[in-house]
Image: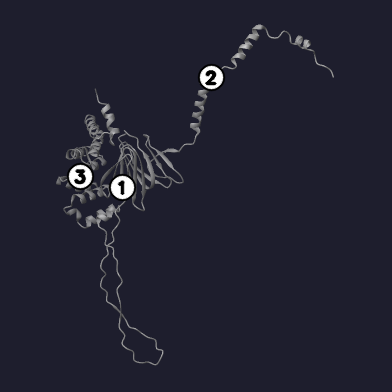
Amino acid sequence: MSSGPSFDESRRALGEGPSAARRGLQRARLLRGGEKPSRVVRPLVFGALVASVVVVAVLWPRPRVEAVALGRVEAVGGTRALEFSEGSQLTLQSGTAIRLEAFDATRAEILLERGHLEAHVTKGTARTWRYHAGPWTIRVVGTRLSIDWVPEREAVDVSVSEGVVEVSGPTGAPVLVRAGQSLQRAPVPRQAVIVAPTPVEPVVVEEVRPRTSPPRALPPSEPVVVPPPLVEAVAPPSWQQLLATGKRAEALELASARGVFAEALGDADALLLADAARLERRGDLSRVLLAGVLERSGPNAAEAAFLLGRLELDDHRPEAGRRFFSRAVALAPDGPFAEQARGRLLEALLELQDLPAAREAARDYLEHHPGGAWEGVALPLTRSEPR
């Protein structure tokens, strides 16, 4: 077995090795090997982490949000998210169908045909949103809410998580629903009326026995009287019952046929019929009924003035709306319609571009209704006052 080169031979082959200066540099590097990474490395690592998070956020699947055009929209087989130009969004659960009937700078009209939707309406745009579900109307300025509508039961369920909405329909005056509240509405069921049966002549049945033996004299048999069947009849519905089931057009037609409009109607009936006429786009009839309530100057006069103003504003007559809303506030400054009248007055003044009056109305609104539904419209006006 041959032996390898000796130690002396190997040392001579390698030479004298690194110099003293080189050995000092190597020793310094070895000593630095146990220290922590320099601070220059930390920002690089942090930046890499941030970049990875951004990449994940971009690539992570999110709900599809699409722009909306006028017409019918339906969510089939999953949730569908819709986004409007100013940032408002609608989320339709599977099986929900809506119809966007109008969308412009001042209003958005959405018909909920069936199902469940969730809405986030951007505040401060001065656009009024109305959701129609059968005979019910849900009016929004800026809020988060959800609506359930089951047409088979004619029942609506409105839940508000932020802001305030106004729910109106065939069962009375509009109702304000605030954050954290919900409202369920269903029409009054029809009532069946049992009437007495019409007298019917008794039916006489003679007893007949089979002949099993030669004929013989039979005793006279007593007649068997069969009572007439009980007849259950349902009286035709009244116009009030038709309104309660959401049949506004039929109710108005029946009221007209029975001469109701020519009678001295009470305020409650006049308000019901006026609201039905408004929803059926019969503004002239609604105005006549509401004007009668206002002229009587009773406890419902402020409500009639408010409803007249709303009718005028919805028909793009802001000057007439301004007069009626101002009168509603004057008649009942702290009444049940005071906040809505002040808020709608602010909308009318903005549509008229009367900024000085709008600023004054905004201050009045915030003084009486801090945190109200029109706060997002009123606050920017007070902040932009000229110095």
| SS category of the residue bearing label 3 | helix
Residue 11's place in the image compared with 164, above or below, is above
User: How far, Cα to Cα, is label 2 from label 3?
Assistant: 73 Å
Residue denoted by label 1: 136
Left/right placement of residue 110 relative to residue 337 reads right
Q: Quadrant of residue 349?
A: top left
Q: Nearer the viewer, residue 111 or 19?
A: 19
Q: Amino acid at mark 3?
A: Ala
Q: Are marks 2 and 3 in contact (CB under 8 Å)?
A: no
Q: Residues within 10 Å of mark 3 (few under 14, many from 20)?
A: many
The residue wearing badge 3 is: 304
Task: Where is residue 345? Give x, y as percent.
Answer: 23, 36
User: How much space separates mark 1 and mark 2, taking CA atoms?
Assistant: 64 Å
Q: Which mark is residue 41?
A: 2
Q: Position of residue 75 (x, y in %)?
A: 43, 45
Picture residue at 17% right of the left edge, 47% below the top: 293
Residue 325: % across, % down: 21, 39
- Name the residue rendered at 23%, 50% in the picture: 272
Q: Is residue 196 left or right of residue 150?
A: left
Count of numbered badges drawn on the protein: 3
Taking the view exactly as shown, the residue that stands out farthest to the left is 296
Query: Type of residue at label 1?
Result: Trp
Q: Secondary structure at mark 2?
A: helix
Q: Amino acid at mark 2?
A: Val
Task: Tell me which residue sits at (20%, 41%) in the image.
Answer: 335
- Judging from the image, what secondary structure is the residue with disc 1 in? strand
Specify whether 87 is left or right of 7. left
* Residue 155 vs residue 361, the one in the foreground: 155
